[in-house]
Image (cartoon, rainbow, N blue to C red):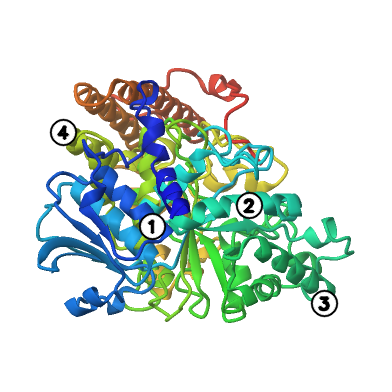
Amino acid sequence: MIRVMATALAGLAMVAAATGPAFAEDGYRLWLRQQAPVPAPDRIAVTAPSPKLALARAELARALPATVASVTLARSDDPRVVHLRLPTRSLGDEGYLVRTVTLDGAATILVTGHSDRAILYGSFALLRHLATGGAASGIALSSTPRVKLRVLDHWDNLDGSVERGYAGASLWDWWTLPDFRDPRYTDYARANASIGINGTVLNNVNAKADSLTAPYIAKAATLADVFRPWGIKVYLSARFSAPIELGGLKTADPRDPAVAAWWRSKADEIYRAIPDFGGFLVKANSEGQPGPRDYNATHADGANMLARAVAPHGGVVMWRAFVYADTDPEDRAKQAYTEFRPLDGSFDDNVLVQVKNGPIDFQPREPFHPLFGAMPKTPLMPEFQITREYLGFATHLAYLGPLFTEVLDAQTGRRPDQTVADVIDGRADHHALSGMAGVANIGRDRDWSGSTFNQANWYAFGRLAWDPGLSARDIAREWALQTFDARAADTVVAMMMPSREAVVDYTGPLGLAHLMGTSAHYGPAPWVSDLQRPEWNPVYYHRADRQGIGFDRTASGSDAIAQYAPSLARRYADPQTTPLDELLWFHHLPWTYALSTGRTLWDEMVHRYDAGVAAVAVMAREWDTLKPVVDAERWQKTATFLQIQQREAQWWRDASLAYWMSINGLPLPVGVTPPAQDLAWFQARHVPYAPGNPG
């Protein structure tokens, strides 16, 4: 009991750390700011105490409003719950039911499920319901996660840096682990549990073999011990060449029995330290990383060898489909499909193929990846980027809920009404294993993610991983009501919903992509053309010349459209039926091409660049109106970041237009303000030491 109470008290660390005068409203408390004037543990009954239920009880005691007289936490097999004949059969291991019932002659809010973890999730759901304006009486909540593995991928390095991280150093202090358990580890786990995230990959996909050595396994085991009460498993990114680097073998060929034996021994070692270890994430044969193709083996050969090492322990392998060759491919957007589609049905049952949301690399807008729906015999796990490598880092306001749902709601065309969400949650092809991954935006900044609004992207990922059918707007409102004064919610949501589209407009409208500076991925650089590999250069992607702009992916070009279902391929083949937002992704068109908007292609591009800049100005004005109802520290930081965003949106717009005008020789439409500087000025601009630790 002492250990249970200690764990429960640790669960309040986030609140305790944030309620002192120095850090009262610095963003540390995330969306978990609600706190009852007087904690009331006496109102909460726990029928069978356990560490997870102690945490659930502590959460409820901290935040239950006075309008709630009684809450009971009980598993569904408790005789009193069984007697109620509630619809719990379909809840699964993690689903919860929250219902106002009568127990022992008294009304109470029952939080139940088939496991203690389900009750913990249900307790957070009850608090979310109340914090977002839900009534305290007549409660009837029930939810079961549609996705089994809901995982954050941390691109954290062993030296404390974070690749594509914009919120400070790594949360994991490998130097002081395993001895020192930073209270932030508990606060991190608590935040994830509140939105249903149940897995964490601790290290960068560009992995070091050292992560698999005994000292680092011990460090990972300490984090696993902290996370376990919150229902979170740890995973590790595995370097494919570890048998050579650590084991002294001469090969890492997955078909070599000695290599397979080495991995089995390594898996056994990890599971002795971490009995509930989740498994491995692998980046192979991409961007210089080693992999099975180094030995003329397939991705399935590599994935299955690792999967068989962890299978006796119940582990999984998440094998990334982000691949492109060291030589110029016909079209980088095609390569993952080309390599993985023929392998459908070749992967073991405990392998998920992890596919980026689009076919290039987390661009502000891409069409959905053509692998979704094209590998029915293989569980596919979408990978979203929560950290905003291409959407303004931490300083630009860009709510990613609409990006996530745009992909999840996309029709694959493979079956009637089949969406990407239907594919990834396993329903479409009856897969028992399903997952969703998000590249984390979390660091050691006090506000965790570099800015208050970036927290919304972490939150949105968790909520959509639990239920891909949720509305991005509803999630934004949930987050706003829990993060700010209720009087700010309408304006905050109005800012959030068009914010990602604004970034698309001022960085790459109409399906343009990969136009950023090519090292730090910061700022505009559509002119870059001198890098060693063709697909590293922005000119490879926009293909602008005197006649037109855009990448021809139709049959007359790279024929990437053939990787989509025939109905979609026919749609993409014709610029008249291609969605306007993806037009230049699929077509190279004349600058004077007439669009459905009534403008020429060039005029529409200019219009969208200006619309993006104008949208940021609108957000800044809207935020100004909230100064009376938002605490000073968070208001000022956001106001300052919006000023930065305004300046950089203008930079993107002016530099891009100056470059396009140098290519097409066309004037700006009448009344449009010309760029503030000439092209040479923008090309000479150099921004060293941008954050994100480019790999």
Which residue position is annotated with label 3?
257
**Dot placed on the residue nearer the N-terminal end, 2 or 4:** 2
User: For the residues carrying marks 2 and 3, which lies nearer the camera in this image?
Assistant: 2
User: For the residues carrying marks 3 and 1, which lies nearer the camera in this image?
Assistant: 1
Query: Vertically, is 325 above or below 496?
Result: below
Residue type marked 4: Arg
Q: Secondary structure at mark 2?
A: helix
Front in this rendered view, residue 556 or 527: 527
- Distance between mark 3 and mark 4 Cα atoms: 64 Å
Contact between labelled residues 1 and 2, with CB atoms less than 8 Å apart: no
Contact between labelled residues 4 and 2, with CB atoms less than 8 Å apart: no
Q: Is residue 482 visible?
A: yes
Which residue position is annotated with label 2?
220
Q: Quadrant of residue 328?
A: bottom right
**Dot placed on the residue nearer the N-terminal end, 2 or 3:** 2
Is disc 4 surrounded by few (<14), some (14 to 19) or many (20+) residues within 10 Å?
some
The picture places residue 547, in percent across and down from the top left corner, at: 49, 44
- Distance between mark 3 and mark 1 Cα atoms: 39 Å
Residue type marked 1: Gly
The picture places residue 555, in percent across and down from the top left corner, at: 51, 66
The picture places residue 204, in percent across and down from the top left corner, at: 63, 49
**Dot placed on the residue nearer the N-terminal end, 4 or 1:** 1
Which residue position is annotated with label 4?
487
Q: Is residue 555 left or right of residue 571?
A: right
Which residue position is annotated with label 1?
196
Q: Secondary structure at mark 1?
A: loop
